[in-house]
């Protein structure tokens, strides 16, 4: 039978019977600490689980991992740590007290954290001799305008066991209507309790969201960056091989010790157990900040405007820490208002876009606002920029649309690696890949070599490269194009994403450009001497044509820098050929010499240097380096003092020694 897992958190004022109700429902007393037992109030988080039948017969079960939170105003930070990753709420209101300050504060915290489903329990109903109907009406009025406005309200008495079946039925109905927690492939477990057991080692508990964890899997702590292998897992006190999203999960992490004086880098509440491939912690967040409209007209510290630059306490997941709030388009945030804000944290945190957080005052006396993370890796230098403003506003308008998040990322950054796109978001890998495929097909983004580009940005990059190449052709027609090193320099501001240059180069070579060594130029570009070298080039051409097989030396051809550059152009363009370190001939002379050598060897099978000199009609000064060059190019092959056609192999029979007859010439090595 199938199981669906959800996390249910209690909420409500101190001494309204939350823990007693959990014990009556589950048989487990969530107040586990001796101090809690002695004082009779919840101080820290308590845990239990409740199994309910599915919505229909034979439809499996609903397993609720319950987090019981403290209601006292001094322990709100622990309350927020318990409700940071919940699916359902059980808001508790005592019949003898009614709606109280922490009832209201807890409801606002639930709203800030995006909790939209729950049940309200009217506890201690046996203390209402006048009946519960007026109290239920009063609670309904208080809930108006909140996410729990239509939540079922059930009168209960844990002392007498009254209303528990009705409460279970209401919880079953609400849970059955909730979508199951989604496996995004991005598991995160916000650690809320750490302890060590003899013979077992360190155990970390928390609510698993975003993905599954398995026995034997390697995980990493964020922040802290320490790794460990999961030796075993438990959920609801049962050993499991695989924990799924929505489970209260205990991980045995033997390689890590709990935080202590001996191990100040040990595991503690507030850290996140996740995978090392899911990104890094960061110390700056850009968020969509809101202050509850329920605070309007209330004379409480929470209702005071949140000022730009205020130092606050930021609660997220199971942890909290100091931060400074910078408002973008306002000087203060009043009840009922929303504004874009940057939060600069005292230490890096591991959050995703789409996560929610709670803002409390620095003294931790009042809950001031709630936030939706829009950019978990914000750059402080971009905070006031127009590009970042457009980026955040678009995301704030459509926070659940992966297409918007992808388009804004590319519009701001220009490029990103496909394997890391929207990595630190609450979108699944499959959802992101489907979005990428759709946008590529629609022409809304460009995919090249494992990278994604905004179309306008990509075209601007290609245009910049094309213009740089064209400028180089115009300024230096003697060169085959723009050097790749220089192109990197020209495009450097746009090459922030690794691999962009290589992707661009591949695209250019497939669309009208060609590479020549370390240069890139337009296909069909013809090398030409620039005007200031034309006279020197003309003189060198004339000298080579006048004495094709007895050319002047390089020093004679290029006695100055201008002539040197002209000669280098003739060599690079193929108009001239270097024959040895000191001699240059025209390409025409070189080709004629090669043809004569080939013809002579076809007729004679072998020849000495002197034979080839006579066949070509050149001097020994040219023929010796020319033979060496022809050997290198495979036109000829040297065997002792003879040259044979290059087609022969080293295994051929060595030729006999050359004759001594003076008319046949003396072989020159």
Image: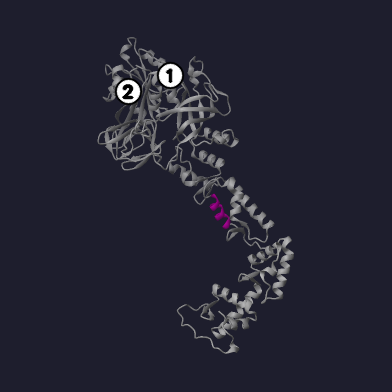
514 vs 123: above or below: below
513 drawn magenta: no
Which of the pair 547/118 is nearer the observer?
547
504 drawn magenta: yes
What residue sits right under mark 1 in the picture? 104
| Quarter of the picture holding the N terminus | top left
Looking at marks 1 and 2 on the same chain, the residue that comes earlier in the sequence is marked by 1
Q: Position of residue 574 (x, y in %)?
A: 64, 68
| Disc 1, SS | helix
Residue 516: name its quadrant: bottom right
The answer to whether residue 294 is seen in the rendering is: yes
| Disc 2, SS | helix
User: Which secondary structure is most common in the magenta stretch?
Assistant: helix
The answer to whether residue 20 is seen in the rendering is: no
Crowd tier of the residue under label 2, counting other residues whose Cα lies within 10 Å: few below 14, some 14–19, many 20 or above: many
- Tag 1 near tag 2, CB within 8 Å: no
How many numbered marks have been drawn onto this rendered protein structure?
2
583 vs 342: above or below: below
306 vs 506: above or below: above
- Label drawn at residue 167: 2
Which of the pair 576/42 is nearer the observer?
576
Q: Position of residue 84 (x, y in %)?
A: 40, 29
Cα distance in 3D space between marks 1 and 2: 21 Å
Residue 193: name its quadrant: top left
Query: In front of the other: label 1 or label 2?
Result: 1
Q: Position of residue 490 (x, y in %)?
A: 62, 50
Residue numbers of the magenta segment: 500-509
Crowd tier of the residue under label 1, counting other residues whose Cα lies within 10 Å: few below 14, some 14–19, many 20 or above: some
Residue projecting furthest to the left: 199
Which of the pair 597/25 is nearer the observer?
597
Residue projecting furthest to the right: 535
């Amino acid at each position: 039978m199938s199981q669906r897992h959800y996390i249910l958190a209690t909420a409500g004022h101190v001494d309204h019977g939350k823990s007693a109700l959990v014990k009556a429902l589950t048989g487990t007393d969530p107040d586990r600490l001796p101090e809690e037992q002695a004082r009779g109030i919840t101080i820290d988080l308590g845990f239990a689980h409740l199994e309910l039948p599915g919505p229909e017969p034979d439809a499996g079960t609903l397993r609720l991992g319950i987090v019981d939170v403290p209601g006292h105003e001094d322990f709100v930070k622990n309350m927020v740590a318990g409700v940071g990753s919940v699916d359902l709420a059980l808001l508790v209101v005592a019949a003898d007290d009614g709606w109280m300050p922490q009832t209201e504060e807890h409801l606002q915290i639930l709203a800030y954290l995006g909790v939209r489903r729950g049940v309200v329990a009217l506890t201690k109903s046996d203390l209402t001799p006048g009946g519960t109907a007026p109290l239920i009406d009063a609670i309904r009025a208080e809930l108006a305008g909140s996410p729990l406005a239509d939540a079922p309200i059930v009168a209960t008495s844990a002392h007498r066991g009254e209303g528990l079946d009705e409460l279970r039925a209401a919880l079953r109905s609400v849970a059955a209507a909730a979508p199951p927690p989604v496996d995004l492939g991005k598991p995160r477990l916000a650690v809320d309790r750490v302890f060590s057991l003899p013979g077992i080692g360190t155990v970390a508990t928390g609510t698993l969201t975003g993905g599954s964890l398995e026995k034997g899997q390697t995980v990493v702590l964020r922040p802290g960056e320490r790794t460990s292998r999961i030796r075993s897992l438990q959920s609801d006190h049962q050993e499991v091989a695989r924990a799924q999203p929505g489970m209260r999960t205990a991980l045995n992490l033997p390689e890590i010790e709990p935080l202590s004086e001996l191990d100040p880098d040990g595991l503690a509440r507030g850290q996140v157990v996740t995978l090392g491939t899911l990104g890094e912690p960061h110390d700056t967040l850009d968020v969509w900040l809101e202050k509850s409209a329920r605070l309007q007209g209330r004379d409480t510290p929470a209702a005071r405007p949140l000022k730009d630059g205020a130092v606050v306490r930021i609660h997220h997941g199971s942890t909290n820490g100091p931060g400074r709030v910078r408002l973008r388009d306002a000087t203060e945030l009043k009840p009922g208002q929303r504004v874009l804000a940057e939060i600069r944290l005292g230490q890096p945190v591991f959050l995703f876009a789409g996560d929610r957080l709670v803002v409390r005052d620095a003294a931790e006396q009042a809950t001031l606002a709630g936030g939706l993370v829009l950019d978990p890796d914000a750059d402080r230098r971009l905070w006031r920029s127009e590009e970042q403003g457009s980026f955040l506003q678009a995301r704030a308008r459509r926070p659940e649309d992966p297409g918007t998040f992808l388009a804004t990322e590319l519009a701001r950054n220009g490029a990103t690696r496909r394997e890391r796109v929207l990595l630190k978001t609450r979108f699944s890998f499959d959802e992101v890949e489907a979005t990428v495929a759709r946008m590529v097909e629609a022409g809304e983004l460009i995919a090249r070599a494992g990278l994604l580009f905004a179309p306008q940005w990509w075209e601007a990059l290609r245009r910049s490269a094309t213009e740089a190449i064209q400028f180089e052709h115009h300024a230096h027609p003697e060169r085959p194009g723009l050097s790749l090193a220089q192109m990197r320099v020209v495009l450097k501001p746009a090459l922030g994403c690794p691999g962009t240059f290589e992707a661009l180069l591949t695209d250019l070579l497939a669309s009208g450009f060609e590479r020549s060594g370390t240069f890139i130029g337009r296909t069909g570009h013809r090398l030409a001497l620039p005007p200031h070298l034309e006279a020197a080039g003309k003189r060198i051409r004339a000298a080579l044509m006048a004495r094709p097989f007895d050319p002047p030396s390089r020093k004679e051809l290029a006695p100055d820098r201008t002539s040197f550059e002209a000669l280098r152009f003739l060599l690079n363009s193929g108009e001239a050929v270097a024959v040895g370190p000191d001699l240059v001939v025209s390409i025409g002379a070189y080709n004629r010499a090669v043809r004569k050598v080939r013809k002579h060897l076809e007729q004679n099978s072998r020849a000495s240097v002197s034979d080839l000199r006579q066949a070509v009609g050149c001097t020994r000064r040219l023929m010796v380096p020319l033979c060496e060059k022809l050997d290198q190019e495979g036109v000829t092959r040297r065997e002792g003092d003879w040259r044979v056609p290059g087609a022969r192999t080293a295994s051929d029979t060595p030729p006999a020694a050359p004759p001594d007859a003076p008319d046949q010439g003396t072989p020159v090595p």
